[in-house]
Image: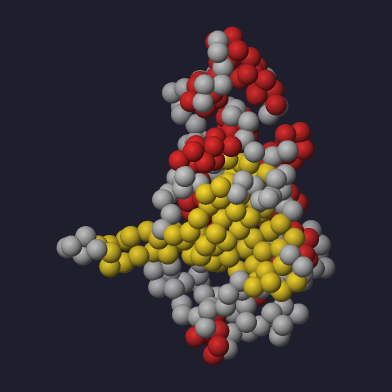
């Protein structure tokens, strides 16, 4: 059974209403995405800025109300109140910016204790302090850090505090919303290695959102690629990274810098990302795709299986685009 199963999730933001309060301008941030996350698995999610990755994660978690679709946790619909409470506890989130995701007026002990208090996971102050100390050590911080404030820490240390806060309620899955993008490269490696260690020790699942394709490939069992609110390809990490099928995925992989002076120059996708308020007809990628034809301009491709565990949304996978 899947730990989390997302079915046809859609999120639209109303940008403008008429005098009757009815929407006249709608931004489709996430459109008809289905995705599963298995126990102990890391699913990577990549795509250009503004493609809807973070909105997708926040909608799944209920931070944004969904426009359509369903989210199942251990086979049960999270629309049911009891399941929603279980889901909120057992699926946590690490936010992108470690500078703004921690309350500067609270000590680290108070920050990590907050979810413990919310779910009544301790009986005495001594037990609470012991749990906080153990969580800090789990993320490679000293117990003495509990009495300090967020501004006294570096970015990497703050992100470790955020991870400790997520771990406080013993989650089964953590959504990592670009958790390393604001950190130095050397610190990024430390955080990713720690996340992998915690996964082995605790049996965690991750939804790992990032721009760094090489890092996503390193940590992920499966990789999904988003473009303009759609999921255009998903499959095993090695397969997607080494033999991308969708033309957009091919460009993303080709743009990954390689430490080889003899390597070919990085590819750059032509054109600009269309406005989500004016989505192209047919395939959303066709204005920038070298394989686009009249069918692409008129008919939107569905995400379909094109190999063992591999899915792509392209009319030309069996033609030139995926070869």
Question: Going by the image, does 94 lie left or right of 253?
Answer: left
- Tell me what residue is drawn at x 44 percent, y 23 percent: 105
Q: Is residue 280 above or below residue 52?
A: below
- Tell me what residue is drawn at x 58 percent, y 33 percent: 166
Rendering quarter of residue 134:
top right
Question: Going by the image, does 201 lie left or right of 22?
Answer: right
Question: Going by the image, does 13 lie left or right of 297?
Answer: left
Q: Position of residue 28 (x, y in %)?
A: 42, 64
Q: Position of residue 173 (x, y in %)?
A: 63, 41
Q: Position of residue 125 (x, y in %)?
A: 55, 10
What colouring style does the render use? secondary structure
Q: Is residue 50 above or below residue 318?
A: above
- Tell me what residue is drawn at x 69 percent, y 39 percent: 204
Q: Position of residue 273 (x, y in %)?
A: 50, 70
Q: Nearer the viewer, residue 32 or 142?
A: 32
Considering the image in quadrants, where does the C terminus appear? bottom right
Residue 92 visible to an observer of this rendering: no
Q: Is residue 223 above or below residue 39?
A: below
Residue 280 visible to an observer of this rendering: yes
- Tell me what residue is drawn at x 75 percent, y 71 percent: 307
């Amino acid at each position: 059974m899947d730990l989390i199963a997302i079915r046809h999730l859609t999120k639209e933001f109303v940008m403008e209403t008429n005098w009757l309060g009815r929407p006249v301008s709608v931004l489709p941030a996430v459109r008809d995405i289905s995705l599963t996350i298995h126990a102990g698995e890391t699913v990577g999610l990549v795509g250009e800025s503004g493609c809807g990755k973070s909105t997708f994660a926040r909608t799944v978690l209920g931070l944004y109300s969904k426009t359509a679709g369903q989210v199942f946790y251990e086979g049960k619909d999270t629309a049911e109140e009891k399941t929603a409470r279980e889901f909120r506890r057992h699926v946590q989130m690490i936010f992108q910016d470690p500078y703004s995701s921690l309350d500067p007026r609270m000590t680290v002990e108070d920050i990590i204790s907050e979810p413990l208090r919310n779910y009544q996971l301790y009986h005495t102050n001594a037990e609470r302090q012991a749990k906080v100390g153990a969580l800090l050590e789990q993320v490679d911080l000293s117990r003495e850090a509990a009495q300090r404030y967020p501004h006294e820490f570096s970015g990497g240390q703050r992100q470790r505090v955020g991870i400790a806060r997520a771990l406080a309620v013993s989650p089964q899955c953590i959504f990592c919303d670009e958790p390393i993008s604001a950190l130095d490269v050397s610190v990024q490696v430390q955080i990713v290695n720690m996340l992998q260690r915690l996964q082995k020790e605790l049996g965690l699942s991750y939804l790992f959102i990032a721009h760094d394709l090489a890092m996503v490939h390193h940590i992920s069992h499966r990789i999904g690629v988003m473009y303009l609110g759609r999921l255009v390809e998903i499959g095993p990490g090695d397969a997607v990274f080494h033999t991308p099928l969708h033309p957009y995925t091919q460009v993303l992989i080709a743009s990954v810098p390689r430490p080889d002076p003899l390597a070919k120059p990085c590819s750059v996708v032509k054109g600009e990302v269309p406005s989500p308020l004016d989505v192209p007809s047919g395939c959303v990628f066709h204005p920038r795709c070298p394989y686009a034809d009249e069918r692409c301009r008129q008919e939107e491709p569905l995400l379909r299986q094109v190999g063992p565990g591999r899915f792509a949304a392209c009319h030309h996978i069996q033609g030139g685009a995926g070869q």
